[in-house]
Image: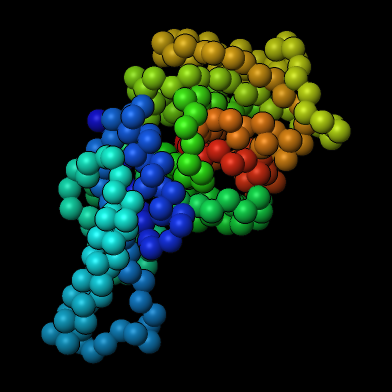
Amino acid sequence: MTKTLLNIDENLASSIALRFSAYLNKFISLSLYIAHVEEPDEKEKVGHGLVHQAWEEGVINSGKRLVERMLRTENIDCPLAGRPRITVGTRDEEILYQLRSGQYKLYIEGYLNTSDPEAFYQLISSPIYTQAPCPILVAKNLSISKKCALLCADSVDPKLLVEQSCKIFGKANFLFDIVYFKFKENEELQFLEQGEAGSNLVETEKLLVEKEKQIENIHVVSGTPEQVGDFLKEYALVASTLPGRKSMRMMTLANSLASVLLVK
């Protein structure tokens, strides 16, 4: 089983993440743990010693009630591996501490898709994403697709993409496609011959075969991030290495409705 930490708050993004986690559990056996971080303003903090301890216990109890409401409302078909972990502090610091100390293999959180590359970059450049010791799944949308895509390009390390993705996919019965992206200002998305993709595609395919993953389709697509992002919406999730700020892949992932598995 894949030991997984899912961070939730009382919002739509967390609702999507809870439901997507339950769907993912049908393909990948998850050992699912819930986390919630209460981030009180400095002005809200009360006293010292026993007074502060009593205040913190009150904040934690409030967080517990929030999590209980979310779980009761969503009623997901995926058993939890333990009690939800409610902490008080800075969100990034608390989540990173749990990921490291708990030796999790996957971190999940929800994200409301805005098609805004800058907002998406701010998310994936945060300390959690840059310092997490495991892959991160950004749950952007609910899906009933059984297809998963590995997003490849000239800038992608095939070995990193395949090896780290397969650590999560394991023996999952997803249908796997390779999508090789070549940026070009076309009027519409174009599909090219595989020979136009370069050596990274050949290496990615070879490594997937060595991992005994059956490849359904290989798509070499030429177009803008908006066009390729729209094409990717048919997938349950898209696996990618962590892209840079000016990367066309970053803009593509920002524009896609598909959930994103970021590996590094």
Q: How is the image coloured?
A: rainbow
The relative height of residue 48 versus residue 27 in the rendered view (above or below) is below
At 50% from the left and 52% from the top, the residue drawn is 111
| Left or right of 190 on screen, residue 134 | left
At 47% from the left and 11% from the top, the residue drawn is 214
Give the total number of marks visible in the rendering: 0
Residue 134 visible in image: no
The relative height of residue 171 versus residue 11 in the rendered view (above or below) is above
The relative height of residue 224 versus residue 5 in the rendered view (above or below) is above
| Left or right of 214 on screen, residue 34 | left
Picture coordinates of residue 131, whole percent (x, y) = 43, 49
Work out whether residue 98 or residue 86 is closer to the camera in this orientation and state it.
Answer: 86
Q: Quadrant of residue 212?
A: top left
At 36% from the left and 27% from the top, the residue drawn is 27
Residue 198 visible in image: yes
Picture coordinates of residue 137, whole percent (x, y) = 44, 41
The relative height of residue 180 versus residue 109 in the rendered view (above or below) is above
| Left or right of 152 on screen, residue 211 | left
Work out whether residue 131 or residue 13 is closer to the camera in this orientation and state it.
Answer: 13
At 38% from the left and 36% from the top, the residue drawn is 23
Quadrant of the drawing holding the N terminus: top left
